[in-house]
Amino acid sequence: MKTAELGLYGPYGGRYVPETLVPALDELERGWREVADDPGFRTELEGLQRTYVGRPTPLYHAERLATDKRIYLKREDLCHTGAHKINNALGQALVARRLGKTRIVAETGAGQHGVAAATVCARFGLECVVFMGSEDMRRQRPNVERMHLLGAHVRSVEFGTKTLKEATSEAIRDWITNVETTHYMIGSCVGPHPYPEIVRELQSVIGREARAQILDVEARLPDAVVACVGGGSNAIGLFAGFVDDRDVRLVGVEAAGAASLGTGRPGVLHGSRSSLLADEDGQIADAHSISAGLDYPGVGPEHAFLRDSGRAQYEPATDEEALAAFRLLTEREGIIPALEPAHALARALELDAELVVVGLSGRGDKDLAMVLDS
Amino acid sequence: MTDPSSDDRKRLSIYLMAGPETPELAEAAVAGGADLLEIGFPFSDPLADGPVIRLAGERALARGMRTAACLACLAETRARVDVPLIPMTYASILEGYGYERFWGDAKSAGATSLIVADLPVEAEPELPRVQLVAPTTPDERIRLAAERTDGWLYLVSLTGTTGARETESSQLAGLVRRARAVTDVPLLAGFGISTPEQAAGAAALADGVVVGSRAVEIADEEGARALREYVASLRSALSTPAGASATS
C-alpha cells in the first residue's frame, strides 16, 4: 500500500498526524513556499544571521587534535546561544510571524533548541512555551535557567521516558490544542511534512559555508564530512553542502544507545515515517545516551533515505568514546564541545581519510556537570 | 433494543482500552446502551490522546497488550457482544504489523472497521476506516473524508486531544453544519464529551456521540457494573428529545 503522498524521501517522511493538524501543516507549507520565493525574507534572514547569530561561523583547523590527518571544525558552537539550533529557530520565527502566529511551542532535549526558541521569541516578542523532559531538566540545568531568563515557560514532562521523545509528543499535543494561534517550532529535521524540508533548508547554511571555506583554505573538497545525528538537523545541514559532491563521504554518528539508523526499523513517530528504535509491534523503544540531544529513538526521514541509498553512512559512538573525545578536544585545542558533537569527533579521529570536516554543532558549557560526574 | 440503524436513534459509541477485562466491560457497556464499541490498541506515543487514555495505554502495554494480545482480546469481545467493534489505534502499530495483514486479522477477530488517529485521509486509501474531521478541516477535506469513510464520520468536536472538558465545545455546531452541507453519512461527535448533559448537547447537533476518557476512567476505577450505569446515564440523556436537556 502507498504511504502518505507528501514530503517523501523514498519510503520515508510523509504526514502521520491527527486531522486537526493537517490544515495547519498545509498553511505552514504555503507560508514556507511564499517566503522561499521572497527576496525580502532572504534579506531579512541573512541580515539577522550576520548581525544576530554571528554567521558565517569559522572553519577551524584543529592541528593539535589530530596529527595523522587534517581535521577542520565547523564552529557552530560559536553561534549566538552556543549551537546550530539558532539557525532553524530564527528562520522559523520569521515564518511564524508572517503566518500571524503569536505563540511558539517547542520541544527540547539538551535544551539547546529550547534556548534558541526562547531567544528568538524574546527577539520578536513572541510567547514561548518549551516542553522538556524532567530527566533532561535535571541533566541540563543551565539551559533551563537560561530559558527562564529569556522569558520562556518551561513545562516539565514527567511521564514515559521523561526525555526528548515525550517532550516532543507533549509539544505536538499543545499544538493540536492551540493550533489557531500557535506555531510549532520543531527543533530537528523530523516531524510531518514540511518540517524536515524546512529545517534542512534553514540548516543548510552550515554546509554552504563549510564547502566554500574548505575550498578557500585547502583548494579541494574534503574526503569526508562528519556530524552527529540525533534527529539529525546539524548533520543534514552540513551534508546539504556536499551531498552533490559524490566523492565526499558523508558520515553521521549516532549515540550507540540511540542508533535509530544503525539498529532501527521502519516505523512512525511524531508525524513521519522513518527508521526508529521500535519493536516488531511498532511500539517505540527507549533510547539511552549520556547526551540528551542524541537521546531520541527517531531520526529525520531524509537520513533514513540517505542511508538506504548508500549516499551517507551512519556509525555509532559510545558514551565513553564521546567523553574521551570531549576531553581530548578540550585539552588539545581549548575548545569545550557539547557531548553531541563529541560523538562525531570520536569517529572522525579514527576515519581513514586525510581531510575531514566535522560539524562542531554546539559548545559544552551545558554538559560540564555530566562530564565531571562521569 | 432499539434498532441502531434507525434514523432517529442517536448513536452512542463507547471507547475501551484493550485489556483482560475488556470482554466483560464491553458486555456491560452494551447492556447500558452502547451501539458500538471502539477498542483501543495501545501505542507508546499516542499524539491525539490526553492524559487518561495515554495513561490507560501505558498500563495496558505494561500488562502485555501488544498487537497479538489486542487481537485476541478483540475476538473474545466479539464472542460476547453483537455491536460493531472498531479497533482504534495509531499508524505505527499498523506499520509494525503490516496494513493489509492488520485489517485482515482484525476483521477475522470481529472488527467491523478501524480508526487510525494519525493516518490522514490521503494515506493508505485501500485501508477501510472511519475518517476523522476536525474544526480546522476545510470543507473540501470534509467532503473527501466523507467519501472515503467507512460507515460514519468521526467529528473531533474541538481542537485538542481526547479527554473530559468542563464545558461543551463551541466548535461542534459549526463543524456539524459544514459536514451536513457536504455529506449524508452519520456524524458522531467525540473528544471532550463526558457528562450526560454534554452527550445530549452534542447529540442534539450530531447523529451520536463517542465517549472515551470518562468511560475508560470509570471502567478502570469502578468496574463493569459502574460502567454499565454510566453508559445507561448517557443513553438516557441521548434518548431525551433533542434540545430538552441540551440547555440544562
Image (cartoon, coloured by chain):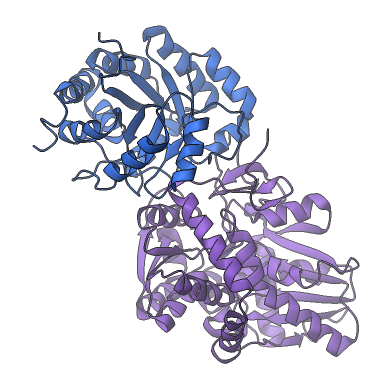
Who's the residue at 17% across and 30% down the image?
B196
Quarter placement of the C terminus of chain A: bottom right
Can you give x and y, in whole percent of width and height, for residue A140 in the image? Answer: 46, 69
Would you place residue A200 above or below residue B23 in this image? Answer: below
Quarter placement of the N terminus of chain A: top right
The quarter holding residue A29 reads bottom right
Number of callouts in the render?
A: 0
For the residue pair A203 and A3, the one nearer the viewer reads as A3
Can you give x and y, in whole percent of width and height, for residue B71 in the image? Answer: 51, 20
Who's the residue at 29% across and 47% down the image?
B171
Q: Is residue B1 left or right of residue A276?
A: left
Who's the residue at 69% across and 80% down the image?
A329
Can you give x and y, in whole percent of width and height, for residue A231 in the image? Answer: 61, 59
- Asked whether residue A231 is in view, the answer is no
Can you give x and y, in whole percent of width and height, for residue B65 in the image? Answer: 47, 27
Would you place residue A312 above or below residue B186 in this image? Answer: below
Q: Residue furthest bottom?
A: A51
For the residue pair B237 and B180, the one nearer the viewer reads as B180
For the residue pair A102 and A116, the one nearer the viewer reads as A102
Chain A rendering hue: purple
Q: Is residue A353 left or right of residue A295?
A: right
Q: Residue furthest front?
A: B181
Who's the residue at 39% across and 33% down the image?
B154
The quarter holding residue B221 reads top left
- Asked whether residue A92 is in view, the answer is yes
Would you place residue A289 above or below residue A331 in this image? Answer: above
Would you place residue B6 above or below residue A99 in this image? Answer: above
Chain B rendering hue: blue
